[in-house]
């Protein structure tokens, strides 16, 4: 059996540490950290994720301010709410749950968030800072969570051949930029127009898959003793949640692999808490959160 990278367990351990950290701020007489979470519409999956985020905030002592807006909300109304939260000194982070209804321009909404409050790290300024190797930006939650998990399990990244499958703005691209930072690893990014996916994935020491296709990755596509990180969350007809990697087929060939559920997902949520605390720390004159140091 390979090493199973247990994101659920690691996220619980980190959450306990974050809870103590928040208690130390409160005992210094500081206010509670606060995260505003905006959900537009009633997509069932989004509701589940938002609930999970709120529960985690409450556990560590971060106030979560919920804004549940109807599907019919206009872009102007959403931008007005963001403007109000941008100007509210008691709000540290702002998260707009994606996907947004199709009548709203997602990129305009992302760019309306004050980059210093952009807990998701999706604002072009934060993306640009990551791309240029500046350390004072905010790193998107899923790539940060994966990085923290790799470091926790002492998986070497230096000089490795990393292949990222999926080139989204929220996972694939920032993940690739993170591995490229300080010329750490050699990165290949594959996507829907990649000519022969297998030619690339077979060479990966570390394979990160964020596509959204069950069983996309099978044993013939992975290198022996490689590390496989599965970001996919796919709900099958029977209600079962699976990743993009055919776990049972691949597991005996690799040295380490993340399960779905219980792998990357919980690390994404804990990174949201870390980013919120990091913003709060900077606002109160502390250094950025140590877990955001890459
Ligand atoms: N602005 C924004 N920021 C996000 O970070 C964001 C978003 N929008 N939209 C949707 C995606 C998805 N996402 C997940 C978070 C946690 C789990 C998670 O905790 N999954 C558990 C349970 C899976 C399940 O049962 O559904 C697991 O993998 O073990 C999954 C997916 C954050 N996202």
Image (cartoon, rainbow, N blue to C red):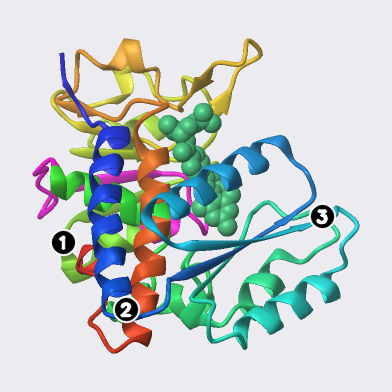
Between disc 2 and disc 1, whose residue precedes? Answer: 1
Between disc 3 and disc 2, whose residue precedes? Answer: 3
Provide the residue span drawn in magenta: 153-175
Asked if residue 13 is positioned above or below residue 212 in the image, the reply reads below
Contact between labelled residues 3 and 1, with CB atoms less than 8 Å apart: no
Give the camera-side residue of 215 and 32: 32
Secondary structure under the numbered disc 3 in the rendered image: loop
Quadrant in which the N terminus is drawn:
top left
Which of the 4 image quarters holds residue 254? top left
- Structural distance between the alpha carbons of marks 2 and 1: 27 Å
Give the camera-side residue of 192 and 49: 49
- Structural distance between the alpha carbons of marks 1 and 3: 38 Å
Q: Residue at x 50, y 56 (%)?
A: 170
Q: Residue at x 25, y 52 (%)?
A: 147
Toward the right, the furthest residue is 72
* 274 drawn magenta: no
Q: Residue at x 24, y 69 (%)?
A: 24
x and y percentages locating residue 206 in the rendered image: 22, 40
**Number of the front mark, 3 or 2:** 2
Magenta segment, prevailing SS (helix, strand or loop): loop
**Circle 3 is placed at which residue position?**
102
Contact between labelled residues 2 and 3, with CB atoms less than 8 Å apart: no
**Circle 1 is placed at which residue position?**
184
Residue 281 numbered mark, or none: 2
Asked if residue 99 is positioned above or below residue 140 in the image, the reply reads above
Between disc 1 and disc 3, whose residue precedes? Answer: 3
State whether residue 41 appears in this view. Answer: yes
Quadrant in which the C terminus is drawn:
bottom left
Give the camera-side residue of 229 and 11: 11
């Amino acid at each position: 059996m390979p090493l199973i990278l247990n994101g659920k367990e690691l996220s619980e351990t980190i959450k306990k540490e974050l809870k103590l950290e928040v208690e130390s701020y409160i005992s210094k007489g500081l206010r509670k950290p606060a995260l505003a979470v905006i959900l537009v519409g009633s997509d069932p999956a989004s509701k589940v994720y938002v609930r999970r985020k709120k529960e985690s905030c409450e556990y560590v002592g971060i106030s979560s301010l919920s804004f549940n807006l109807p599907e019919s909300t206009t872009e102007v109304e959403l931008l007005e709410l963001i403007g109000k939260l941008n100007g509210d000194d008691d709000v540290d982070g702002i998260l707009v749950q994606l996907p947004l209804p199709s009548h709203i321009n997602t990129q305009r909404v992302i760019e309306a968030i004050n980059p210093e409050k952009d807990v998701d790290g999706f604002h072009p300024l934060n993306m640009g800072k990551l791309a240029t190797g500046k350390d004072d930006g905010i790193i998107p939650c899923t790539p940060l969570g994966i990085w923290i998990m790799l470091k926790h399990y002492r998986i070497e990244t230096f000089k490795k051949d990393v292949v990222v499958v999926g080139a989204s703005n929220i996972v694939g691209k920032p993940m690739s930029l993170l591995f490229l930072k300080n010329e750490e690893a050699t990165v290949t990014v594959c996507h829907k127009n990649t000519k022969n996916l297998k030619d690339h994935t077979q060479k990966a020491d570390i394979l990160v898959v964020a596509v959204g296709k069950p069983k996309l990755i099978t044993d013939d596509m992975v290198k022996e003793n490689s590390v496989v990180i599965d970001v996919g969350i796919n709900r099958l007809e029977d209600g079962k949640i699976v990743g993009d990697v055919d776990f049972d087929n691949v597991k005996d060939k690799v040295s380490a692999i993340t399960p779905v559920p219980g792998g990357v997902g919980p690390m994404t949520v804990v990174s949201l808490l870390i980013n919120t605390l990091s913003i709060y720390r900077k606002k109160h004159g502390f250094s950025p959160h140590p877990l955001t140091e890459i």
